[in-house]
Image (cartoon, rainbow, N blue to C red):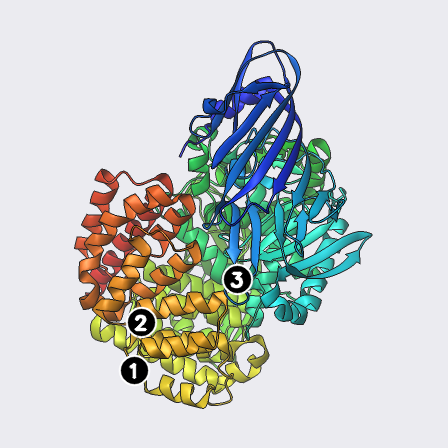
Amino acid sequence: MVVLTRAEAQGRARVVAVRQYAVDLDLTRGEDVFGSTTVVRFAALEAGVDTFVEVRPSRLVRVELDGVGIDPGELCEGRLPLRGLAAGEHELRVEALMPYSRLGEGMHRFTDPEDGCAYVYTQCCVADAPLVFACFDQPDLKAEFRVSVTAPAGWTVLGNGVAARGGEGGRWECAPTPPISTYLMAVVAGPFHSVRTEHAGLPFGLHVRRSLGAYLEADAGELLEVTRRCFDRFHEIFDEPYPFDSYDQAFVPEFNSGAMENPGLVTFRDEFVFRSAVTDTERQTRAMVIAHEMAHMWFGDLVTLCWWDDIWLNESFAEYMGYQVLSEATRFTDTWTDFAVERKCWGYDADERPSTHPVAPDADAVPDTAAARGNFDGISYAKGASALRQLVVWLGEKSFLAGINGHFARHRFGNATLADFLDSLGRASERDVRGWAESWLRTTGVDTLVPRVGESEARQWYVDVEHRGDRPHRLAVGLYDRAPVDESRLVLRERLERDVPPGGGRLTVTLDGPRPDLVLVNDLDWTYAKVRLDPVSWGTVRSSLSGLPGQLSRAVVWNAARDMVREAELGPLEFVRVVRAHLPYETDNAVVQGVLAFARGHAADRFLVGAERTEALGLLGEVCRELLEGGGGGGVAAGGSGVRLTAARYFIDCATGPEDLLAWRAAERVPGGGPALDVELRWRLLLRLSVLGAVGAADIDEVRAGDPSARGEEAAARCRAALPSAAAKEAAWEAMFGPADALSNYLFTATAQGFWQPEQWELLGGYVERYFADVVPLAARRGPALAEAAGRYAFPEAFVDEETLTRGEECLTSGAPVPELRRRLEDQLDDLRRALGVRAAVA
């Protein structure tokens, strides 16, 4: 696929100014193509300009420039050349038939298996707008959009501006937009179920396919409440009012991202419309995504990056503001705990791989749109948000908000760079913002903070914090003592706020009184750094972690233990034993969920083998059983937050035999006061029974018959691929990698998730070689989104051995994978090397 380079974009921006796109889409042309007519009004800024527009049609029907025809045969690899343009205004008209996508790129079309209704929606980021309309596809050529759509009767059409029926039949006209970038243009259409209201004088709407309408109705009150509260909070802290004419949120099928910040029309994956019981942590995650996308209306839509090296100006800010605004404006006041145990670990892991990059990389490091796609990762989201949280602590919230409000005022409806943003912050504060940015935004890797507690000659205790790294840190040091009556409980003696100097400098704190039982560096998780515990503090944690007050403090300790496992400083089985001792008493579901996810998916499945893995799964099953029964008070105290539901899910996942699961299935509920087996739990249980060989294809077909939905189709594909038979594995492989290319991204992912199972390594051995032979051509012919899925979900994670590593390295050097697959394989192989290192240390 042809990519746009930064040099090409800069050259085009010097000679072209785009005024307006008039885009007319015809969605009545059948199931394979749609009509797209684009009129682009633009100016050539000098005489004799040679430039091009991008369009990737099934068939280019007609092209006219200033009323004069251009041969459609001029189109080459998605580019239509415009040669010798006179200085001044021009009008380009492009008529084309465009392909519907089944992979979530361009204009995606989905037919609901439950009722046969069809739905379409656009996804134009990063470089897929030319799959929808002809355009100068780069973020710094913003323009007004006037969009019209012809849709089948009975459909609803949504756009960036308010959409209204125009004339007879299925004709819709969208209100013109302010200047926005091409990657933000959006259309959603289909027979949607909608819930509409008004807030702050603007129309608000929630939209979902009909088969999920009842579930939307059940959740609409919460969704709208979160939306209103976040909207009002953004208006309290931002001087610039919401910049668009409406706020629609469409939950669409087979969406590749969590959500997309299209101005006035945010699209979400429709798994966020819950059809089964969920935990409060999952509701909080959904609310955070709502807040994150709303923050983009300012960070990204009002003020937009110039080029993709500044992705962080969109994503890091939206991530930080999403968590912060949610904690300030809604009932979800503990969002930063979830960030610590789930989101932040994504950043830590990404930052320790060879593919790491600065939060704000040099422009030369993002030479084209293919490179840009790879940077939508844990660095640009989680690490960037962590850096901003540290910036607010260091700079002060008042100066931070003053800086970003000045930034909006100076660049509204325009584009900006890192330098522009630092200039805005510098105007609002006397601190060395540029020096801070060089340390935090232009560097890679994770600093490590290692405390040593000792006694001085004056018989005073002190904490000496060794700083391995080059960034300054403003953090809290928590000093905890065992409670006098109950030594399993810890009480906070004092929390000290201190600055750790950059460049490997040390922080020394003198303590009053006796030695604390626990010294916790980075208490409250203000900064982004790995933390270690001194030997006495680790002993205290080993015996009293569950008695540490404050879930955010406990999250910091669990993260430290997690990193010690990854660095082979703590045995994975020993980690699981700590989990067994303390997690049954945990009352915060985000902590329970995050710890169990690592313990099962990494400590047990990747770092342990044989009898030790079986022992670990057994211990985790005991944890889950105790949480289900309310052991230690954790399950009972936190029942409303979903601890029991989380425990039920992981009990299923950790089962080493089918007996308990078959009993649950027969009873249609989890014993001990646990949840009933709703549709999602039923599928989860069936998946584990499939892995264990306790059910067959007929059982899967029976459950599928009772759940004819798209999610049921995906769950059934996952279960069939998990069956431990040669025929089932070969059928799944053919579906994923065979020549038919029939699977959508979601069905491909579901099949891949079921395929590789640690319990089935003898059955799967021959597929490792086949994976590295088949994945490269598959990714090349099916495009970036499928390439990413194939590298992420179809990789043979169950095989932690040198042979798999060698085959993977050979694939990278001789297979010529497309960039999206190469990046994912590089990360997978680095994780494999780490797992091999941990296993060697354990042995």
Task: List x then y, in percent, for residue 352.
Answer: 37, 48
Residue on which disc 3 sits: 112
Q: Nearer the viewer, residue 842 or 314?
A: 314
Mark 3 and mark 2 in contact? Answer it, CB < 8 Å. no
Q: Residue at x 73, y 38 (%)?
A: 176
Task: List x then y, in percent, for residue 230.
Answer: 70, 56
**On the picture, is 304 further left or further right than 732?**
right
What kind of residue is marked 3? Asp
**Is 421 rendered above or below residue 228?**
above
For the C terminus, the quadrant is bottom left
What kind of residue is marked 1? Gly
Q: Residue at x 28, y 67 (%)?
A: 757
Q: Nearer the viewer, residue 100 or 387?
A: 100
The residue lying furthest to the right in this view is 201
Task: List x then y, in percent, for residue 626.
Answer: 43, 84
Asked where in the image residue 36 lies, by quadrant, the reply is: top right
**On the picture, is 810 further left or further right than 199?**
left
For the N terminus, the quadrant is top left
Give the number of the mark in front: 2 or 1. Answer: 1
Q: Residue at x 75, y 44 (%)?
A: 166
Give the number of the mark in front: 3 or 1. Answer: 3
Distance from Cα at disc 3 to Cα at disc 1: 36 Å
Count of numbered badges drawn on the protein: 3
Dot 2: element = helix
Q: Residue at x 67, y 57 (%)?
A: 154
Residue on which disc 1 sits: 657
Q: Is residue 700 visible?
A: yes
Asked where in the image residue 662 lies, by quadrant, the reply is: bottom left
Dot 1: element = loop
Task: List x then y, in percent, for residue 87.
Answer: 64, 11
Q: Residues within 10 Å of mark 3 (few under 14, many from 20)?
A: some
Find residue 574 and name its label.
2
